[in-house]
Image (spheres, rainbow, N blue to C red):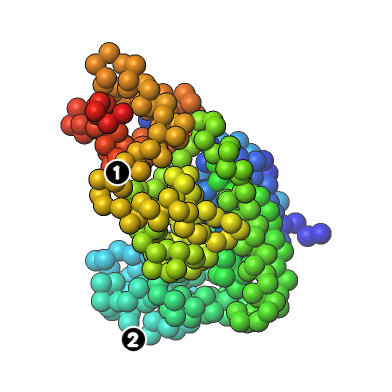
Amino acid sequence: MDVPIMELKNVNMKFKMPGGNFFTALEGINFSLESGKIAAILGPSGCGKSTLLRITTGLLKPSVGEVYYKGELQSSVNDRMAMVFQNFALFPWKTVEENIELGIKEESDPSKTKKTLEHIIDVVGLEGFEDVYPKELSGGMKQRVGIARALVSNPEVLCMDEPFSALDALTSENLREETLDFWSEGKSGLSNILIVTHNIQEAVYMADEIFILASNPGSIKSIYHNSLPFPRDQKSDEFLNTVDVIYNILTQNIMPEVPKSTIYERIAPIPLVSVSEIIGLLEVLDDNKGRLELFELSEHIKRDFGRTISIALATEMLGFVETPRHDVIFAPLGKKFLDADINKRKIIFKDQILKIPIIKAIVALVQKSEDKVITREECEEFLIEKLPNERAEDLFETIVNFALYSEVLDYDSRDEELSLITQNV
Ligand code: ADP
């Protein structure tokens, strides 16, 4: 076999957190990619996709492990790779052409550069827009500029971080297709595309290799070789079957069928979502006869797939829904909660959160403290000790949000103190 264009060996990534602890974002990452292939890094929000992409490009140095490019150990930013960002990352005070020019390397021959620039502007459909400023462009046109700026450096690998997720469905579909056309023409010297996405259809439409990531810590759970011939027909049975297979792998990883009895037994992290997101999910379920498939739910609540799964898991943890396979259905308590007035809702919510071990433990900590008050710092230290692999600040925010809503605890954000609301516990 030829030398792979890129290869990651035993990559781990730990971030140092305020307070000196480490957060493991990626663990045990191994993959290689053949030249000429498109790979997708697929997984829910926060599982480490962008971090993995940045490590691959050399923008970030892994804590452990090696990155190889065409068989050579990579020790700095790889200038054969170019990046396209979700939020376009354009300079508002520069015109379309000036923004694209930023992608040109300093050492390039100026006469060639002008030609490349004109060619790229033509290819990505920006002709006539050269002197326009980003604010005058639609989202789709802005991303054309982002893509042009990456392509103008004649990269071998185009790295794309959720490039189409801020765009409407039709625009993203067009841009996906155009990106594939550009790659398959091969005239530009573009050999590979590495795309980060949480959209299964996008991964199946574009990629030959799909690296399916799981969270906590981010790791590759499965690599799917997608051999559907190009151009891919999104409505064909083969395409839909592939989406289903990947969907199953992804949801198995993220939504294991845990026996309900184990949910409340040990101190475990809770999904980082807000009470209003939980109520929003229940309202949408109510409008849809109490049952929705996860993908449909994600469309209805206008959250990406990864976020939708987190909200569904939190709602399940509270006993408000059940999640058999890929469906989310009302549990009787969820319906009762939604139909109740605000005071009854708070009581139901309080009863449920006090069954969750980590919240129970925090409430006990406050109860045991001298004045029934603990500082945010003390609480976060406790969380770090109990759940060292979690982001204590995020966990704290979520617990406070739940506890404030149900009037279990009070939080003084000025003094950063958590106290007990005695009459309620
Ligand atoms: P994704 O792209 O899958 O949404 P990211 O790679 O952006 O995930 O992040 C993975 C995890 O690593 C998240 O919990 C994120 O908060 C954390 N993380 C990313 N970058 C840093 C950083 N520089 N410092 C601390 N934590 C980080």
Q: Along the horizontal axis of the image, is 325 left or right of 355?
A: right
Indicate the amino acid at tag 1. Answer: Lys
Q: In which quarter of the image is residue 370?
A: top left
Task: Check disc 1: other Cα within 10 Å, few if <14, some if 14-19, many if 20+.
Answer: many
Do labels 2 and 1 touch, CB within 8 Å? Answer: no
Q: Which residue is pictured at 38% across the width and 53% down the height?
A: 336
| SS of the residue under disc 1 | helix
Cα–Cα span, label 2 and label 1: 58 Å
- Farthest residue toward the top? 370
Q: Which residue is pictured at 31% across the width and 28% down the height?
A: 425
Q: Which residue is pictured at 49% across the width and 64% down the height?
A: 291
Task: Tell me the residue that label 1 is attached to.
Answer: 346
Q: Would you place residue 391 above or below residue 43 in this image?
A: above
Indicate the amino acid at tag 2. Answer: Gly
Query: Residue 93, position in %: x, y?
Result: 24, 66
Q: Nearer the viewer, residue 177 or 44?
A: 44
Q: Would you place residue 369 above or below residue 347 in this image?
A: above
Q: Which of 345 and 81 is in front in this view?
A: 345
Q: Which residue is pictured at 61% across the width and 43% down the height?
A: 259
Q: Quadrant of residue 362?
A: top left
Query: Residue 41, position in %: x, y?
Result: 58, 58
Q: Is residue 269 visible?
A: yes
Q: Along the horizontal axis of the image, is 247 left or right of 34?
A: left
Task: Tell me the residue that label 2 is attached to.
Answer: 128
Query: Residue 150, position in %: x, y?
Result: 47, 66
Closer to viewer: mark 2 or mark 1? 1
For label 1, being within 8 Å of ligand 1 is answered: no
Q: Along the horizontal axis of the image, is 346 left or right of 58?
A: left
